Structures are given as structure tokens and as C-alpha cells.
Amino acid sequence: MSTIENLVDDLERSHAEAQERMSDPAVYNDHRKAAESGRRLKELEGPKKLADAWRQTQADLEASRNDPELATMSADLEIELARLEEELKLALVENVPWIDAKYYAATQVMDEARHVEVFAKYLDTKLSGHYPVNAHLKMLLDDIIQDSRWDMTYLGMQIMVEGLALAAFGFIHQLTTEPLLKQLLRYVMSDEARHVAFGVLSLQDYYQELSSHELRERQEFAFEAAVRMRDRFLQQEVWARMGVDVKEAVALVQQSPERAMFQQMLFSKIVPNCKKLGLLDAADGWLRTRFEELGVIQFENWADTGEEYDMFALANGEVAGSGGEGGAGKAA
Ligand SMILES: [Fe+2]
């Protein structure tokens, strides 16, 4: 099926579900739920009209191709169909719907630029240089950014990628004895915790209004991202640079108990945050079962980042070089 057909199918399903919710007494008797569902239905009305026109034009085009008398219309209908597809794509690209989130996003960009700067400098001046972004991670990031739904980009970026980064930084922060790296990680983690917490807070309410079909899509997206991130930690590019046989090294690494522990630790932030969003148990607990299979469900009752991010915040004067260890020590 073509992408546009998938988009239209999803849209029609979401529209039908939103209509159904509006006639559910549990929704229309609850002022807040009714307002939310009404807003959702209104958002879908415009794209739904475009989708209807697209279906009609597609049927007309089909008819014109099978009828010699209508054949002259085919070219015009093809142009009309292409125009409708463009409009539909634009209408379905949902931006983050509220202004505070846009202000917040601007501050996050600034944070990330600082992180890139400091880690690049550390790697290039204190160690032997850095590696380009891992190909698997790059593909995952592209998929996350290209999704037209704002909440999918948030789920991928703020919850999955940032959640994994926070756990990985926490792990290295605990293990390293190098004071400068420890301090840098402490600073970066205080930012990352804020990024993840913002994702949790912004998605939490939104997900309460989604149907179980829509939630299932989010679960699948989260699971796929989790598996792709886990599998990228085989460090092939490192073995290659060290002149070690990559295949042999990867086979050995895969048997190492330390690596298994590290891989599990990577999920220590993701699982509680997915739980907080209601994603573990929605749609018959699909994601819970997947996380059980991955062997990471034991993290479900760890603190979610919405609760713990205060612990990561820098204390007064900590940035000035007091060497404070407090927050990260408690939280990591
Ligand atoms: Fe971040």
C-alpha cells in the first residue's frame, strides 16, 4: 500500500474513533474529556475533507481510464490527485500545538549545542578524537524527525533517545574515576533530565485521549526504537579503528556479561517513563510483554524522570566549580 493510502487509512480510523468518543456518555458527561475530544475531532475535520476529496478523485481517475469518452479527463484528474496528496501531507504534518513548547524547544536546542561542543572538545583534546554518528542511530534519528505527528517525534526523541542517553551518562558517571569527565557528565545530565521530564509531562495528558489503536501505534514505535538503539552498541567502528577483526570482536562482545548488564541499564529510564505515559499497559499490555521479552521489565517501578528530575538539578554554585557530586550520585 502506498504511504498516502496508509496516511488516509489512519486518518479515517482516527476520525471515526474521535466521533465515537463524542457519543460516549463517559466522555460527554465529563467536561474536560468532552472539551479534549471535541478539540481532537475539530483538528481532524479539515484533513478528513481532503481525504474524502482524494478518495473521490481517485475513483474518478479510475473510471476515466476505463472509459474512452472520459479518457481526456485523465490528465487533469492526475494533476488534481497529486495536488490533493500534497495538501493532505501538509495537513497531516502536525506541529507541536502550543507556544510554550516552542519556547522550550528553543532552549533545548541551545543545551544540545553546548553538549556537542563540550564532548567534541573533550574527545579531541583529552582523548584520541571522535567518531561520526553511528549509522544505525542516524537512521533512527531521521525516522523520528520525519514522522509527521508531533507526539511521535516527542516520544522518539524526548523519551527514547534522551532517556537512553540519560541512563548511559548515569552509568558512565558512576563508573569513571576521571574527575573532568565526571564533572562534564554531571552538567549534561542535569540538562538531559529536564529534556526527558518535559517529554513525559507533555505527552502524559495527550496520551490519555488517544484510542487503543492509536496507543498501540505508539507502543510499536517505542519498541522498535528501543531495539534499534540497543543493537547499535556493538561498536563495530571502534574495533575497526583499533585494527581488531570486527566479526570476532562482535561475537566476543555479545557473550560478555558486562555488556548484557549495560544493555539492560540503558532501559532503566525508558521503562518507567513509558509506564508513566500509560504505554506499558495500554492495548492489552502489548509493550509490557515486549519489555518482558527483552528482559527489562524490572525497571518499571524505578523513578520516572518527571519525579526524579529535581535530583539532577544543579545546586547553587555547583557550576562555578565546587565539584559537587550530590544530585547525580543520588539519581544515577
Ligand atoms: Fe538532550
Image (cartoon, rainbow, N blue to C red):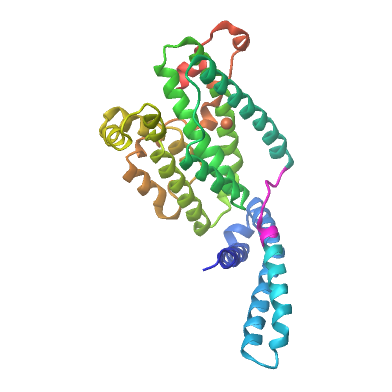
**Residue 118 lies in quadrant:** top right
Residue 173, horizontal then vertical, whole percent: 45, 19
Residue 187, horizontal then vertical, whole percent: 56, 19
Between 4 and 207, the one lying in front of the other is 4
Between 196 and 143, the one lying in front of the other is 143
Between 193 and 106, the one lying in front of the other is 106
Between 118 and 183, the one lying in front of the other is 118
Queried whether the magenta region covers residue 18, the answer comes back as no
Using the image, determine if residue 87 lies above or below residue 189.
below
Q: Is residue 5 left or right of residue 137?
A: right
Q: Main secondary structure of the magenta part?
A: loop
Give the residue at x 35% y 38%: 296
Picture mark count? 0
**Residue 47 lies in quadrant:** bottom right
Q: Quadrant of ligand 1?
A: top right
Q: Residue furthest front?
A: 243
Give the residue at x 49% y 45%: 278
**Residue 263 lies in quadrant:** top left
Residue 293, horizontal then vertical, whole percent: 32, 45
Residue 190, horizontal then vertical, whole percent: 56, 22
Q: Quadrant of the C terminus?
A: top left
The range drawn in magenta is 89-98
Q: Residue furthest top?
A: 322
